[in-house]
Amino acid sequence: MDLAVNLAKRSHCIKAQVGAVLTRDTRIISIGYNGPPAGTHNCDEEFSDVGCPRDSKGSCSLALHAEQNAILYAAKNGSEIEGSTIYVTLSPCIACARIIYSMKIARVVFLHSYAEYKGIGSDEGVDFLRRFGVAVERYAPGEGGLLVSEPPIAKKTV
Ligand SMILES: [Zn+2]
Ligand SMILES: [Zn+2]
C-alpha cells in the first residue's frame, strides 16, 4: 500500500490522484495510477486553469482509473491476473469493480473510501464486488505502522 500511495503522486490528474498495485503470490505484477492513456493528455498541463473535461458523474473523462491502468498493463504483458490481489488508494468505482470481477481478481485492499469522500451512503463498487464473492477489505497498517496519505479527492484545487 505504501507503493500505491507513492504511485498516486505521479498522477497528472487535477481532481483525484489514485495509485494501484497488482500482486500475485506476494510479487508485484503490475502498477498503475489514474490518468489518460500514455501519449495522449496531461490534464494538469493542458487544462491547468479550467480543469479537465468531465463526464456526467464529474470525473475526468479522459483518464483511465488506476485499477484499469494496472490491469491493462498486466494483461498486455501476459501476466496471470486470476487470483491476484489489487491494492488501491481509493475504493474502486463500479466500472472498475466490473473489470476487477471479470478478470477474476480475488482480493481488493483499499485505503480511502470513495463513498466517505463523496458523502454518499454506500460504496457501490465495493458492494458489487462483495456481492459476487470478491474479498474486499480496508487497509489496516500493522502494529506501529504509519501510512500518511493525503485524501485523494480534490487534492489539487483548480
Ligand atoms: Zn483529468
Ligand atoms: Zn474506477
Image (cartoon, rainbow, N blue to C red):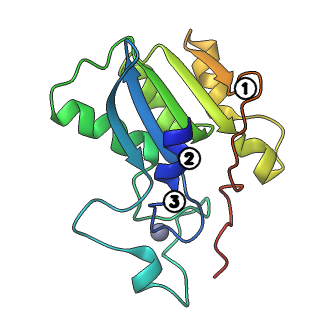
Which residue is the extreme one toward the front? Answer: 144
**Image quarter of residue 42:** bottom left
Give coordinates of residue 120: x percent, y percent: 81, 45
Residue 45 shows in this picture: yes
| Amino acid tagged 1 | Ala
The residues bearing labels 1 and 3 have C-alpha atoms spaced at a distance of 21 Å
Q: Amino acid at mark 2?
A: Val
Estimate the spatial distance between the alpha carbons at disc 1 and disc 2, rounded to whole Å.
Answer: 14 Å
CA gap between label 3 and label 2 equals: 7 Å
Circle 1 sits in a helix, a strand or a loop, which is it? loop
Q: Which residue is mark 3?
A: 9
The picture quadrant where one finds residue 108 is top right
- Image position of 93 (left or right of 33): right
Residue in view at x 29 percent, y 59 percent: 37
For the residue labelled by badge 2, is the local secondary structure a helix, a strand or a loop? helix
Q: Residue at x 49, y 41 (%)?
A: 3
First in sequence: mark 1 vs mark 3: 3
User: Label 2, on which residue?
Assistant: 5
Residue 93 appears in the rendering: no
- Tag of residue 140: 1
